[in-house]
Image (tube, helix red, strand yellow):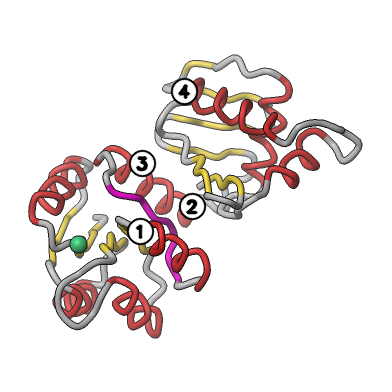
Amino acid sequence: MTSIVVVEDEADIAQLLALYLGNEGWTVHLADDGETGLAAIRARNPDFVVLDIGLPGNMDGFEVCRELRRTSEVPVLFLTARDDEIDRILGLEIGADDYVTKPFSPREIVARVKAVLRRGAQKFEAGRTTFGVVDINTDRHEVTVDGEVVDVAAQEWALLESLVANQGTVLSRQQLLDLAWGVDWIGDPRTVDVHVRQLRRKLGDDLPLVTIRGAGYRLG
Ligand code: CA
Protein backbone atom coordinates (compact mmCIF):
# COMPACT_ATOMS: atom_id res chain seq x y z
CA MET A 1 0.00 0.00 0.00
CA THR A 2 1.25 3.47 -0.85
CA SER A 3 2.20 5.50 2.20
CA ILE A 4 2.77 9.23 2.36
CA VAL A 5 4.26 11.47 5.03
CA VAL A 6 2.93 15.05 5.03
CA VAL A 7 5.08 17.60 6.89
CA GLU A 8 2.94 20.73 7.33
CA ASP A 9 2.50 22.94 10.40
CA GLU A 10 -0.80 24.53 9.37
CA ALA A 11 -3.30 22.10 10.87
CA ASP A 12 -6.17 22.90 8.50
CA ILE A 13 -4.03 22.33 5.41
CA ALA A 14 -2.58 19.14 6.90
CA GLN A 15 -6.05 17.77 7.69
CA LEU A 16 -7.34 18.61 4.22
CA LEU A 17 -4.40 16.84 2.59
CA ALA A 18 -4.84 13.84 4.88
CA LEU A 19 -8.48 13.66 3.80
CA TYR A 20 -7.84 13.89 0.06
CA LEU A 21 -4.76 11.67 0.00
CA GLY A 22 -6.53 9.18 2.28
CA ASN A 23 -9.45 9.09 -0.15
CA GLU A 24 -7.07 7.71 -2.77
CA GLY A 25 -6.51 4.73 -0.50
CA TRP A 26 -3.09 5.92 0.59
CA THR A 27 -1.86 5.72 4.17
CA VAL A 28 -1.11 9.24 5.38
CA HIS A 29 1.05 10.18 8.35
CA LEU A 30 1.19 13.81 9.49
CA ALA A 31 4.08 15.68 11.10
CA ASP A 32 4.02 19.36 12.06
CA ASP A 33 7.68 20.35 12.21
CA GLY A 34 10.93 19.50 10.46
CA GLU A 35 12.55 17.29 13.10
CA THR A 36 9.40 15.23 13.67
CA GLY A 37 8.90 15.01 9.92
CA LEU A 38 12.40 13.75 9.24
CA ALA A 39 12.10 11.19 12.03
CA ALA A 40 8.72 10.04 10.68
CA ILE A 41 10.10 9.69 7.15
CA ARG A 42 13.08 7.68 8.39
CA ALA A 43 10.91 5.46 10.58
CA ARG A 44 8.19 4.83 8.03
CA ASN A 45 10.14 4.75 4.77
CA PRO A 46 7.13 6.16 2.82
CA ASP A 47 6.57 6.08 -0.95
CA PHE A 48 6.10 9.82 -1.06
CA VAL A 49 6.73 12.97 0.99
CA VAL A 50 4.72 16.21 0.89
CA LEU A 51 6.93 18.82 2.52
CA ASP A 52 6.04 22.37 3.51
CA ILE A 53 8.98 24.78 3.31
CA GLY A 54 8.04 27.21 6.09
CA LEU A 55 8.14 25.06 9.23
CA PRO A 56 8.56 25.98 12.91
CA GLY A 57 11.61 24.83 14.84
CA ASN A 58 15.19 24.40 13.71
CA MET A 59 14.62 22.76 10.35
CA ASP A 60 12.70 24.22 7.45
CA GLY A 61 11.59 22.13 4.48
CA PHE A 62 14.82 22.77 2.61
CA GLU A 63 16.88 21.39 5.49
CA VAL A 64 14.63 18.37 5.88
CA CYS A 65 15.03 17.61 2.18
CA ARG A 66 18.78 18.10 2.30
CA GLU A 67 19.10 15.69 5.21
CA LEU A 68 16.76 13.24 3.58
CA ARG A 69 18.69 13.21 0.32
CA ARG A 70 21.80 11.90 2.05
CA THR A 71 20.16 8.52 2.40
CA SER A 72 16.88 8.50 0.47
CA GLU A 73 15.54 9.00 -3.06
CA VAL A 74 11.90 9.17 -1.92
CA PRO A 75 9.91 11.56 -4.15
CA VAL A 76 9.38 14.97 -2.49
CA LEU A 77 6.66 17.47 -3.38
CA PHE A 78 7.31 20.87 -1.83
CA LEU A 79 4.55 23.18 -0.65
CA THR A 80 5.64 26.78 -1.07
CA ALA A 81 4.07 30.09 -0.12
CA ARG A 82 6.57 32.55 -1.57
CA ASP A 83 8.29 33.38 -4.85
CA ASP A 84 11.78 33.42 -3.34
CA GLU A 85 11.21 29.85 -2.17
CA ILE A 86 10.40 28.83 -5.74
CA ASP A 87 13.62 30.47 -6.89
CA ARG A 88 15.53 28.38 -4.36
CA ILE A 89 13.80 25.18 -5.43
CA LEU A 90 14.64 25.85 -9.08
CA GLY A 91 18.06 27.36 -8.50
CA LEU A 92 19.62 25.06 -5.96
CA GLU A 93 18.41 21.76 -7.36
CA ILE A 94 17.52 20.83 -3.85
CA GLY A 95 16.28 17.40 -4.76
CA ALA A 96 12.58 18.16 -5.07
CA ASP A 97 10.49 16.21 -7.54
CA ASP A 98 7.85 18.90 -7.85
CA TYR A 99 6.37 21.83 -6.01
CA VAL A 100 2.97 23.41 -5.54
CA THR A 101 2.33 27.04 -4.63
CA LYS A 102 -0.11 27.97 -1.87
CA PRO A 103 -2.99 28.42 -2.05
CA PHE A 104 -3.57 25.16 -3.91
CA SER A 105 -6.47 22.83 -4.42
CA PRO A 106 -6.13 19.41 -2.73
CA ARG A 107 -7.07 17.85 -6.07
CA GLU A 108 -3.98 19.41 -7.58
CA ILE A 109 -1.80 17.79 -4.92
CA VAL A 110 -3.42 14.42 -5.55
CA ALA A 111 -2.80 14.79 -9.31
CA ARG A 112 0.84 15.73 -8.72
CA VAL A 113 1.45 12.85 -6.33
CA LYS A 114 -0.07 10.44 -8.85
CA ALA A 115 2.03 11.88 -11.66
CA VAL A 116 5.27 11.54 -9.70
CA LEU A 117 4.43 8.04 -8.49
CA ARG A 118 3.48 7.00 -12.00
CA ARG A 119 6.64 8.45 -13.47
CA GLY A 120 8.53 6.00 -11.31
CA ALA A 121 6.24 3.06 -11.98
CA GLN A 122 5.82 3.55 -15.67
CA LYS A 123 9.22 3.81 -17.21
CA PHE A 124 8.99 0.48 -19.00
CA GLU A 125 5.63 0.95 -20.69
CA ALA A 126 6.83 2.06 -24.10
CA GLY A 127 4.48 4.08 -26.25
CA ARG A 128 2.01 4.74 -23.48
CA THR A 129 1.89 7.46 -20.87
CA THR A 130 -0.89 7.78 -18.33
CA PHE A 131 -1.73 10.64 -16.00
CA GLY A 132 -4.86 9.95 -13.97
CA VAL A 133 -7.67 9.64 -16.55
CA VAL A 134 -5.46 10.94 -19.38
CA ASP A 135 -3.94 8.18 -21.53
CA ILE A 136 -1.48 9.24 -24.23
CA ASN A 137 -0.60 6.56 -26.77
CA THR A 138 2.26 7.74 -28.97
CA ASP A 139 2.27 4.50 -30.97
CA ARG A 140 -1.34 4.93 -32.00
CA HIS A 141 -1.23 8.75 -32.12
CA GLU A 142 -4.18 8.83 -29.80
CA VAL A 143 -5.06 10.51 -26.54
CA THR A 144 -8.04 9.55 -24.40
CA VAL A 145 -9.59 11.12 -21.32
CA ASP A 146 -11.61 8.70 -19.21
CA GLY A 147 -11.56 6.28 -22.14
CA GLU A 148 -12.97 8.82 -24.63
CA VAL A 149 -10.79 9.75 -27.59
CA VAL A 150 -10.04 13.48 -27.58
CA ASP A 151 -9.78 15.39 -30.83
CA VAL A 152 -6.44 17.22 -30.80
CA ALA A 153 -5.16 19.28 -33.71
CA ALA A 154 -1.97 18.12 -35.46
CA GLN A 155 0.09 20.89 -33.90
CA GLU A 156 -1.29 20.19 -30.44
CA TRP A 157 -0.38 16.54 -30.87
CA ALA A 158 3.16 17.46 -31.96
CA LEU A 159 3.52 19.61 -28.86
CA LEU A 160 2.14 16.87 -26.59
CA GLU A 161 4.46 14.29 -28.12
CA SER A 162 7.48 16.55 -27.55
CA LEU A 163 6.45 17.03 -23.93
CA VAL A 164 5.92 13.31 -23.39
CA ALA A 165 9.32 12.50 -24.93
CA ASN A 166 10.94 14.90 -22.47
CA GLN A 167 8.86 14.09 -19.41
CA GLY A 168 10.13 15.62 -16.20
CA THR A 169 12.35 18.11 -18.03
CA VAL A 170 11.70 21.84 -18.25
CA LEU A 171 11.52 22.93 -21.88
CA SER A 172 11.69 26.57 -22.95
CA ARG A 173 9.22 27.96 -25.47
CA GLN A 174 11.98 28.05 -28.07
CA GLN A 175 12.90 24.41 -27.44
CA LEU A 176 9.26 23.44 -27.76
CA LEU A 177 8.96 25.40 -31.00
CA ASP A 178 12.03 23.64 -32.38
CA LEU A 179 10.74 20.23 -31.32
CA ALA A 180 7.10 20.54 -32.28
CA TRP A 181 7.08 23.12 -35.05
CA GLY A 182 10.55 22.46 -36.47
CA VAL A 183 13.65 24.64 -36.41
CA ASP A 184 12.69 26.32 -39.69
CA TRP A 185 9.47 27.66 -38.29
CA ILE A 186 9.54 31.42 -37.78
CA GLY A 187 6.96 32.78 -35.40
CA ASP A 188 6.00 34.07 -32.02
CA PRO A 189 7.05 31.82 -29.10
CA ARG A 190 3.71 32.71 -27.51
CA THR A 191 2.19 30.31 -30.03
CA VAL A 192 3.36 27.66 -27.58
CA ASP A 193 1.29 29.25 -24.79
CA VAL A 194 -1.82 29.15 -26.95
CA HIS A 195 -1.38 25.46 -27.71
CA VAL A 196 -0.57 24.66 -24.08
CA ARG A 197 -3.85 26.32 -23.11
CA GLN A 198 -5.71 24.19 -25.64
CA LEU A 199 -4.12 20.99 -24.36
CA ARG A 200 -4.97 21.88 -20.77
CA ARG A 201 -8.54 22.69 -21.73
CA LYS A 202 -9.02 19.48 -23.72
CA LEU A 203 -7.19 17.06 -21.42
CA GLY A 204 -8.18 18.54 -18.05
CA ASP A 205 -6.62 18.70 -14.59
CA ASP A 206 -4.99 15.27 -14.61
CA LEU A 207 -2.47 16.39 -17.22
CA PRO A 208 0.51 17.56 -15.11
CA LEU A 209 1.61 20.22 -17.58
CA VAL A 210 3.32 22.77 -15.35
CA THR A 211 4.28 26.34 -16.15
CA ILE A 212 7.79 27.03 -14.84
CA ARG A 213 7.98 30.76 -14.31
CA GLY A 214 10.60 32.40 -16.49
CA ALA A 215 11.71 29.07 -17.94
CA GLY A 216 8.97 27.31 -19.89
CA TYR A 217 6.91 24.19 -19.41
CA ARG A 218 7.31 20.76 -17.93
CA LEU A 219 5.17 17.65 -18.25
CA GLY A 220 5.07 15.44 -15.17
CA1 CA B 1 4.13 26.50 7.04
Marks 4 and 3: which is nearer the front? 3
Residue drawn where x is 68% and y is 18% of the image = 153
Mark 2 Cβ inside 8 Å of ligand 1? no
Region rendered in magenta? 95-102
* Residues under numbered marks 4 and 2 in contact, where contact means CB atoms less than 8 Å apart: no
Marks 1 and 2: which is nearer the front? 1
Question: Mark 1 sits on what residue?
Answer: 77
Pick whichever, 15 or 12, lies toward us. Answer: 12
Find residue 21 and name its label: none
Find residue 111 and name its label: 3
Question: Mark 2 sits on what residue?
Answer: 119
Q: Classify 67 as above or below 195.
A: below
* Residues under numbered marks 1 and 2 in contact, where contact means CB atoms less than 8 Å apart: no
Secondary element under disc 1, as helix, strand or loop, is strand
Secondary element under disc 4, as helix, strand or loop, is strand
Residue 5 percent across, percent down from the top left: 21, 63
Query: Real-space Cα distance between discs 4 and 2?
Result: 18 Å
Residue 90 percent across, percent down from the top left: 50, 64
Query: Real-space Cα distance between discs 3 and 2?
Result: 12 Å
Question: Mark 4 sits on what residue?
Answer: 145
Pick whichever, 131 or 35, lies toward us. Answer: 35
Question: How many badges with numbers are in the image?
Answer: 4
